Image (tube, grey):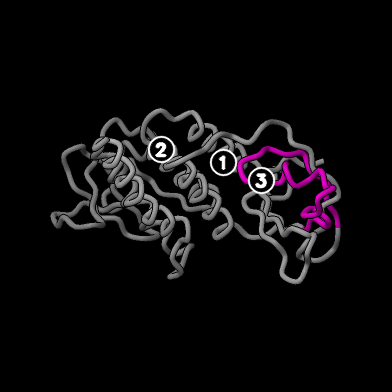
Amino acid sequence: MDGSAPLSCIAVRGAKTSLMLDVFTEESGRVRLVAKGARSKRSNLKGALQPFTPLLVRFGGRGEVKTLRSAEAVSLALPLSGITLYSGLYVNELISRVLEHETRFSELFFDYLHCIQALAGASGSPEPALRRFELALLGHLGYGVDFLHCAGSGEPVDDTMTYRYREEKGFIASLVIDNNTFTGHHLKALASREFPDVDTLRAAKRFTRIALKPYLGGKPLKSRELFRQFMPARKARADNTNND
């Protein structure tokens, strides 16, 4: 048995009763599975094989796509809706796009679960949970960045000074302010993964987008586009409610 969390469930082309799954497991990392017969009316798997449902699974096979032997939900699907649902889809897509197949990331697996649980319980903005997960993901990928020292001088960063981020080098003191520069206050927030205000959250989002770009390439994220479509519709519903 292997603890897992389904990232996506996609109908297999040419198969009327099977599902193709992309799952994130504690022991094996990201694994592609085929669940034979899962779409049939008599299958007891269909209800369990949903995103954000923690599972115990058993699978086997030699190819890149393994065969799902059994799956048991260990809890109900975590309740995500609205903004938190799109945030969860974004996290799932990050894992699907960035992690190599069948490479173990046990600590990241629990970082993922903590993120989804935080999103499910969020009463405010999902941004802090997303930024913490992105930073954890970068760390597990070996993207080591020293947020607390200037890469040029080795001196501790100063809250009031500005530092330019340089890939594979770190942060170097700079007088120029642009999208790649951050204050020492921002860098300390990134190091602690605590974001006490909107300014530090925005800085964290800028940094993680810059740092994740080499891993994501030029292909846009589908979840981000879905979120852009969702926001105008959400605003329109709110306006209609206010006008009632």
Marks 1 and 2, how far apart at CA: 14 Å
Give the residue drawn at x 47%, y 61%: 222
Q: Amino acid at mark 1?
A: Tyr
Q: From what the image shows, is residue 193 above or below residue 142?
A: above
Q: Nearer the viewer, residue 60 or 70?
A: 70
Q: Nearer the viewer, residue 115 or 190?
A: 115
Q: Residues within 10 Å of mark 3 (few under 14, many from 20)?
A: some
Left or right? Give the position of 142 relative to 51.
Answer: left
Residue range corresponding to the magenta coloring: 34-60
Mark 3 lies on residue: 50
Local secondary structure at mark 1: helix
Mark 2 lies on residue: 126
Closer to viewer: mark 1 or mark 3: 3
Q: Which of marks 3 and 2 precedes in the sequence? A: 3
Query: On the rendered image, what quadrant is the C terminus found in?
Result: top left
Local secondary structure at mark 3: loop
Label pair 1/3, CB-CB below 8 angstroms: no
Numbered mark located on residue 112 in the image: 1
Local secondary structure at mark 2: loop
Q: Splitting the image into 4 quarters, where does residue 27 fall?
A: top right
Across and down, in percent, residue 239 comes to 26, 42
Across and down, in percent, residue 179 comes to 23, 57
Across and down, in percent, residue 31 comes to 71, 55
Q: Amino acid at mark 3?
A: Gln
Q: Is residue 196 magenta?
A: no
Q: How many marks?
A: 3
Give the residue drawn at x 61%, y 41%: 52
Q: Which of marks 2 and 1 precedes in the sequence? A: 1
Closer to viewer: mark 2 or mark 3: 3
Marks 1 and 3, how far apart at CA: 16 Å
